[in-house]
Amino acid sequence: MYQAKAYSAASATSPLASTKIPRRDTTDRDVQIEILFCGICHSDLHSVRNEWSSIMPTVYPIVPGHEIVGRVTKVGSAVTKFKPGDLAGVGCLVDADHTCPHCRDGLEQLCPNQTLTFNSPDKHLGGVTYGGYSESIVVDEGFVLHLPANLNLAGVAPLLCAGITTYSPIRRWGDLRGKKVGVVGLGGLGHMGVKFARAFGAHVVVFTTSPGKKEDALRLGAHEVVVSRQASEMQRQAGSFDFILDTISADHDLNAYLHLLGRDGNLTLVGAPEKPLAVSAFALLFGRKSLSGSIIGGIAETQEMLDFCGQHNITADVEVIPIQKVNEAYERLVKSEVKYRFAIDMASLKSA
Ligand code: NAP
Ligand code: ZN
């Protein structure tokens, strides 16, 4: 075991602050990674503030961060896919049971015995796992991803969560060519959803509460932008969508979006608001519509997404910050001000 520099929060109301955390020595199967950038996901903020207390209560201190990119510094004797000096990424998962039906189908994100990158029981050291707001991490090679070498590394970090979380349901929907797809909420997930839906040939419509994001939405690949607080703009889109991806992090009226689906249309939730959302049965019955959810993606699909991004030059639009600005960044995240993902430059941790 060794000590690594990190940023943690001591309670739901404490700011994140500099600390040291234990990391395990590399076992035979482990890869040790020097973390270069870590994205800030809204899930980090939900967890730090214990907003998911009824589902996943937060154990303090918490070190968040599951959009990790860096360089391999050490590998265990049984590691075959990585060597020191390689680029490597880690997303939301660091372990799973490998035996359940979901794992056997390559859907580790659904494994009931999965280990999340932070705030999950740590099988090696006891306590809970600590995430990527840290100078290094040690992960089983089965959960470490290869990164495309041609992309800006800070912009690759958010692919490990925001990227796969939007890529997976978009791919699962099927052939989107010529289909009308809505992306609701233009934040970290939303802006990746726009890029992927566009890359797969859909007609993309962004729904935003922020009129100031209109130009950006078009630049990111949207064909149309709807300011969702304008009732007339919403009404014009009624009954016309094949698929809507909802990335909103807070309470909102789901029925307003179900109303926009066409026959057999589907709305997939990836946003995870703190409180339950009300659904009108009639919003689903008329039009035979469906409402579903999706959570990140499996390891193989995450690698597929990263390779796709390498081939198509897709990265997140990032605002790179030093770790000392993380609390300020959280405040801006709550106000929907981020354009469109914060990435922490982990070199800043050296002076923390
Ligand atoms: P984010 O960057 O903060 O983006 C969320 C966007 O939602 C905001 O930019 C804003 O877009 C919109 N929004 C925020 N508050 C709103 C409100 N009160 N009413 C309507 N719209 C509102 O967050 P993120 O990192 O993309 O994450 C989004 C959600 O997905 C979070 O709940 C997160 O925990 C969850 N998540 C789920 C998974 C999964 O596997 N399912 C993975 C990662 C994250 P506009 O300004 O355009 O309106
Ligand atoms: Zn995330």
Image: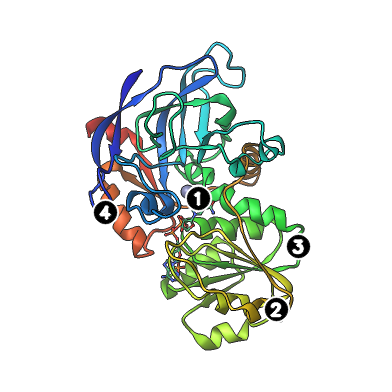
Q: What x and y, as percent, mark residue 37?
A: 41, 38
Q: Which residue is mark 1?
A: 316
316 or 255: nearer the viewer: 255
Quadrant location of the C terminus? Answer: top left
Callout 1: CB less than 8 Å from ligand 1: no
Q: Secondary structure at mark 1?
A: loop
Res 328 label: 4
Res 329 label: none
Mark 4 Cα-neighbour bin, 10 Å: few <14, some 14–19, many ≥20: few
- Of callouts 2 and 1, the N-terminal one: 2
Q: Which residue is mark 3?
A: 177
Amino acid of disc 1:
Ala
- Of callouts 2 and 3, the N-terminal one: 3
Tag nearer the camera, 2 or 3: 2
- Of callouts 3 and 4, the N-terminal one: 3
Q: What x and y, as percent, mark residue 193?
A: 58, 58
Contact? badges 2 and 4 (CB < 8 Å): no
Contact? badges 2 and 3 (CB < 8 Å): no
Tag nearer the camera, 2 or 1: 2
Mark 3 Cα-neighbour bin, 10 Å: few <14, some 14–19, many ≥20: few
- Of callouts 4 and 1, the N-terminal one: 1
Q: Which residue is mark 2?
A: 285
Q: Secondary structure at mark 4?
A: helix
Q: CA distance from mark 2 to mark 1?
A: 37 Å
Tag nearer the camera, 3 or 4: 4
Mark 1 Cα-neighbour bin, 10 Å: few <14, some 14–19, many ≥20: many
Q: CA distance from mark 2 to mark 3?
A: 26 Å
Amino acid of disc 2:
Leu
- Residue in the picture at 36% in, 17% down: 1
The residue most toward the bottom is 232
Callout 3: CB less than 8 Å from ligand 1: no
